[in-house]
Image (cartoon, rainbow, N blue to C red):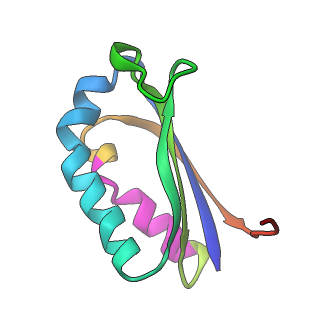
Amino acid sequence: MLYMIYSTDVENSLQKRLAARPAHLARLNELDQQQRLFAAGPLPAIDSPDPGEAGFTGSLVIAEFDSLAQAEAWAAEDPYIAAGVYASSIVKPYKKVLP
């Protein structure tokens, strides 16, 4: 089943985010290689695909896991948490309808 992981950043997290980004992306690439990643990306703080110093307000990941507990465990081990980027994360089942 697909699960949505919606995480919000602490304020002024851009430098922490940039430092932890390689480890964060490595985990996402692993899901992608396993064909379990549906979508992933950051949430720009301003209306721009490249927000520059404005940074990001969080991230969204939609991926396949065997259970909600497994998705929650995966989310809890995100390098952005250890780096102090994320203030919180919400994990919920996701059902793709369109397209």
Q: Quadrant of the C terminus?
A: bottom right
Q: On the rendered structure, is 37 left or right of 19?
A: right
Give the magenta range: 69-79
The spot of residue 92 in percent (x, y) is 67, 61
The spot of residue 93 in percent (x, y) is 69, 67
Q: In the rendered image of this protein, does residue 43 appear above or below residue 93?
A: above
Residue 34: in magenta span: no
Q: Quadrant of the N terminus?
A: bottom right
Exactly how many numbered labels are in the figure?
0
Question: In which quarter of the view is residue 86 placed?
Answer: top left
| Residue positioned 29% across, 55% down in the render | 25
Question: Is 97 in front, or is 15?
Answer: 97
Q: On the rendered structure, is 64 left or right of 82?
A: right
The spot of residue 49 in percent (x, y) is 48, 29
Residue 73: in magenta span: yes
| Residue positioned 23% across, 34% down in the render | 18
Q: In the rendered image of this protein, does residue 10 appear above or below residue 53?
A: below
Tell me the chief SS of the magenta region. helix
| Residue positioned 41% across, 26% down in the render | 50
Question: Is 56 in front, or is 68?
Answer: 56
The spot of residue 10 in percent (x, y) is 42, 26
Question: In which quarter of the view is residue 28 placed?
Answer: bottom left
